[in-house]
Each structure stands twice: as C-alpha cells, then as structure tokens.
Amino acid sequence: MSVGAVAVVTENWLIESEDYGTFVIDSEVMNTLISYRQLGKHDCEAGGALIGCLQRINTVAANDLTLPQPSDKRTKYSFFRSNAHNKILNDKWKASKGNAYLVGLWHTHPEPTPKYSNQDKKDWHKVLKQGEYEGQFLIFIIVGQKCIRLWVGDNRNFKISLKGEYSLEK
C-alpha cells in the first residue's frame, strides 16, 4: 500500500460515550470523508453537514452527509460552509418525512492529527446556539491526513469534548 493509502472502510465506526450514548458513523460516510483528505500540496479544506437519525434510545447514526458545494469558500487552511448545505438538509428531511436531520458537521484539516481551531470552535458554538437540530448535542468531525477525530458539542453548557479517533493508518 502506498503512503497515504487507506483500505476501504467496510464496517461502521462505533463510538461509545458515557455522557451521550453511542455514535454510529456509516462506513459509506467514512469512505466519503476519507476521500476528501488533504494529502496534496494544493488541496483545499472541504466540509459539509452530517445527516442522520436516532436509531435507538441513546444511539445517533450519521448515515449521510452533504458534500462540498460550489458556493462554499475553500482554501488550504479554511472552509466556509455556504447556505447550499441547508437546502440539501431541508430536502433530505422532507424526503425522509422528518426522519433524517442534522446530527453534526464535518470538515478537513491539512494536518496528520486534526485539532480544532479557534475559528472551528466559534463556528461550532454558533451552530449549537442558532442551528435547527434534534436533541441536546451535535457531533463535529475533522478529517486529518492520518486520522479522523470526533467531538461532541453540548448545547446545554456549550462544552466541546473529544469522544473518538479513527486511525487511517493500517
């Protein structure tokens, strides 16, 4: 396998959290996230929304996502999600009769192990305060070059907590 190559993900990513229950990130969603890693010198950040549902009590599943849109602003070190994602979310919510909704946000970083920036934290807090979503929290995924990390943002205390890390090096 060449440097940076990742085997296709065939199983869902499961994250257990005492505070928030179980998160299930669908394998197809994982493969799409991996496809946007910033491995090239000129690759820009990419991002979108995570779409999912409550599978069982205390289990949130992300089984769909929005892809980068032409109206997004993308540079090597920044990503601005345009309102086009909201239209896609709304259309998918209507098509699912209200069963598919915003469960979180995702974007990429040009670093091996991603850490959220001050701008990411501001964006996440804004969505937690002003966004339309089900429940008390959202998940936030950042795709790095060597791993994917998942944080949970709680809308009761606006605390951001790292809950999972998925290695892309096998």
Image (cartoon, rainbow, N blue to C red):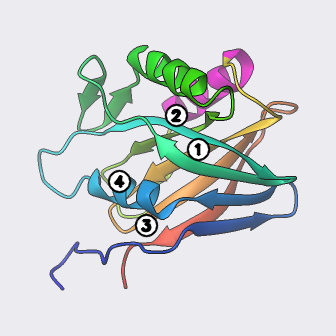
Which type of secondary structure does the marked residue at label 4 adopt? helix
Ranked by sequence position, the earlier of labels 1 and 3 is: 1
Q: Is residue 126 magenta?
A: yes
Residue beneath disc 3: 147
Q: Indicate which disc residue 9 carries.
A: none
Q: Look at mark 2 in the image and give the residue it sits on.
A: 120
Residue 166 lies left or right of residue 136; in this view the side is: left
Residue 128 place in picture, x, y as percent: 70, 26
In the image, which is nearer the foreground, mark 1 or mark 4?
4
Tell me the SS state at disc 1.
strand
What SS does tag 2 mark? helix
Q: CA distance from mark 2 to mark 3?
A: 18 Å
Crowding at mark 2 (Cα within 10 Å: few <14, some 14-19, many 20+): some
At horizontal 62% and vertical 42% (from top left) the residue drawn is 52
Specify the quadrant of the image occupied by residue 67.
top left
Q: Position of residue 132 (x, y in %)?
A: 69, 19
Q: Which residues are magenta?
A: 118-130
Which residue is tagged 4?
32
Mark 1: amino acid: Phe
